[in-house]
Amino acid sequence: MRKLFNSLPKKDFGDELRALENELRITEMKLDPTKEQMNRTPPRVGRNEPCPCGSGKKFKKCHLTKKEVPMND
């Protein structure tokens, strides 16, 4: 039995496996984003970092106590 098994041609499935993995990646990229991916929160600003409004002041002296921080792009 072992001789029969060893005499069979061995096939490398590496190329076929890589092709299937690539097809899977392409299919996943075509899907719409999930709710978790869409609901990302913006990065938090540290107290001692410059305020994102562009005033040049530290965040704690400028907008720490205010609800909304105007973003300066």
Image (tube, rainbow, N blue to C red):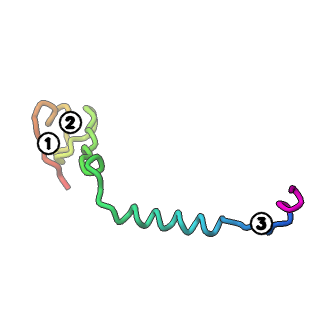
Taking 24 as reference, is 62 above or below it? above
Q: CA distance from mark 3 to mark 2?
A: 66 Å
Does residue 25 appear to the left or right of 56 in the view shown? right
Q: Is residue 27 above or below residue 53?
A: below
The mark nearer the N terminus, 3 or 2, is 3
Circle 2 is placed at which residue position? 59
What residue is disc 1 on? 69
Tell me, for residue 24, which label it has, or none.
none
Q: Residues within 10 Å of mark 3 (few under 14, many from 20)?
A: few
The residue positioned 35% from the left and 66% from the top of the image is 30
> Mark 3 is on which residue type?
Lys
Q: Nearer the viewer, residue 9 or 67?
A: 9
Quarter of image, res 62: top left
In this view, the mark in front (2 or 1): 1
List x then y, in percent, for residue 32: 29, 60
Neighbor class of circle 2 (other Cα within 10 Å; few <14, some 14-19, many 20+) is many
14 to 73, vertically: above or below: below
Few, some or many C-alpha atoms within 10 Å of disc 1 (few <14, some 14-19, many ≥20)?
some
Question: Is 5 included in the stretch rendered in magenta?
Answer: yes
Q: Are marks 2 and 1 in contact (CB under 8 Å)?
A: yes
Q: x, y percentage for residue 65?
A: 12, 30
Amino acid on which the number 2 mark rests in the picture: Phe
Sequence-wise first label, 3 or 1: 3
Stretch of the chain drawn in magenta:
1-6
Numbered disc 3: secondary structure? loop
In the picture shown, does residue 9 fall above or below 39? Answer: below
Q: In x, y percent, where is residue 12? A: 71, 66
Name the residue beneath numbered marker 3.
10
Q: Residue furthest front?
A: 1
